[in-house]
Each structure stands twice: as C-alpha cells, then as structure tokens.
Amino acid sequence: MGAAGCYCGHRYLHHGSRIEPDAQPAARYSRPVAVRYRGWPMTSGATPRVDAVLFDLFGTLAGFNFPEYDACAYAIANWLDAPAAAFASELEVRYHDLETGVLGLPAYLSEAAQRAGARHADPYRLGLALDRWRAFQDTQLRPWPDAVHGLGHVRDAGLPVALVSNAPPLVHELWPGSPLGSHFKVAIYSNVVGARKPDLAMYRHAAAGLGIAPDRCLFIGDGSSGELAGAVAAGMHAVQIRRPADPPENDARFGREIWHGPRIGSLHLLPRLLGGR
C-alpha cells in the first residue's frame, strides 16, 4: 500500500462468471477482447499453471480505512499540540522512510511532530501517540471476507502463499497474530528488505523463500505503487483486484498504476483464475 500518487486506467470488469474488458478503449491494443497478456488470454479467466501465489496486503487482502487514518493523525496532532494539516503533511513526506526501515515508528512520529511545530512533543505524549497509532494499525489488518475464502481455496489447492507488502515496522510486528498471518508460509516486508515495491528485490525474496521460480508465481494486488508492473518485471504473472465497493478516490491515495492486464473484482474468483485447482 502506498499513500501518494494518482493513477487511473483501462478497466476490466467481472460479469457473472465472465471476466472481460469494459467499453473503454485500451490504448495499447487494437482489439482488447482478443488481447493476450504474458501468454494467456485475459478473457479466459484462467492463468497458466502456477506453483505459488503472492499477495499484496492493503487494498488486496485487507482494506485500508483512510478516514480512520486521518482521524488517528488528527488525534495525535491534537495531543502533541501540532497544526493538524502540517503534521499530516510531514507524516506523508517521511512515510517512505518508515516503510523502508530508515525510521522506526517512535522516530517517525517524533520527527513529524518537530517539523510540524508541535509544542508538547514530550515523552509521555509521544507514548500516547504510539499507543493510538498501534490501535489504528491493528484495526487495519481485518481481512476482507473474500480474502478468507480465496486463501482457503489456495490452501486447499496445495499452493504455498507469500505476502509481499510495503509495510511499516508495526505491521511486521502485528502480522503473525493477525487473522491472516497463519495462512502464509513467507512474508516479505519492505521495512526488512529496505526497499519498496516495485523494487524487484521484494518479489525475488518472496519467490526464493517459497523455493519457486518467479515464472511459476502469480502475484495478486490492487496496483498500489506500481506493484503489478514490478511483478511482471520480476518474471511473474500478475492480476489486479479491484472490488466494486472500493471508492475511486482511493486510487490517488494508494498511488495505483495504470494497468492493462487481467483484473478480477473479488478473491472469490480465485478458483476460476487458477483453472479449477
């Protein structure tokens, strides 16, 4: 999950049991219905045989509630007596450093407070801020209902799964005890690798951890931060998930890429996507 950027592009819609492009023209293809992507037809609804499935986290397996994030940032700014808008801006500016492990959460909040001109960023109030942020982050690991179903199908099919997430250290800490943590053999976090998707190291670490060649891996994500293009560059197959209930304004805050490849609207479609495995 990323928090900046603005992307939009050609949509692929799910109609009943069919996965097909909508009426918008695909700029890179003259016949979007017949297009083939990485060697398989997008309208077939099934991928080539794969031996592992890799998942993004936020926007894919779990939602990220931006109103709750904004409320958390506002509450912390209020406790630290910092201008709310300036504090929120500083959080955005340094978020890359948080996700890549350059800053831990205490330093991240403290530096943002100082740069925003906080007047009461004492250890006690910063401790309250850390507790508030932890409580917020914990709520964001609640899975989408279709994620539980989809992961269950992948497990029943005997395919190992890996998490590949642009995630701050707190997610790394909370993930093993989350409702989804037990489903995953491997979890790759940007704050541990020191790089964010679409850096190829993220995908290669996941494939190596599973012991599966990249070209036998399927990556599923919502398209944040160029992650789908990154998966393809790493030699993997990639599919975008875009739920109908996902607000369009999330495109900008997630930094979703323009994606001309296959798309599904729910992880309930994984059995079809995996060819009935």
Image (tube, rainbow, N blue to C red):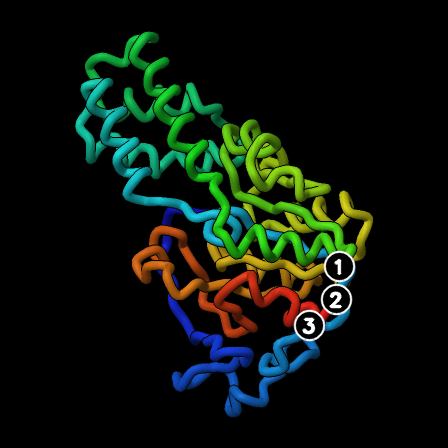
Please say whether residue 214 is visible from this viewpoint: no
Q: Quadrant of residue 18?
A: bottom right
Residue positioned 40% across, 45% down in the render: 64
Q: What's the residue at 59%, 41% (across, down)?
A: 180
- Three-letter code, disc 3: Thr
Q: Nearer the viewer, residue 49 or 212?
A: 49
Corner quadrant of residue 46: bottom right
Query: In percent of the image, x 58 and y 67: which residue is there?
Result: 269
Where in the figure is residue 225, as x and y percent of width and height? Answer: 47, 53
Q: Quadrant of residue 247?
A: bottom left
Q: Amino acid at mark 2?
A: Arg
Per the model, the C-alpha gap separating discs 3 and 2 is 11 Å
Is label 2 in contact with label 1 (beta carbons under 8 Å)? yes
Q: Which residue is mark 1?
A: 157
**Which residue type does callout 1 highlight?**
Ala
Q: Which residue is mark 2?
A: 277
The picture places residue 21, in percent across and down from the top left corner, at 48, 81
Q: Nearer the viewer, residue 120 or 158?
A: 158
| Labelled disc at residue 148 | none
Q: Nearer the viewer, residue 84 or 90?
A: 84
Q: Is residue 156 left or right of residue 245?
A: right
Which label sits in the foreground, 3 or 1? Answer: 1
Determine the secondary structure under disc 2: loop
**Is residue 196 positioned above or below 136 on the image?**
below
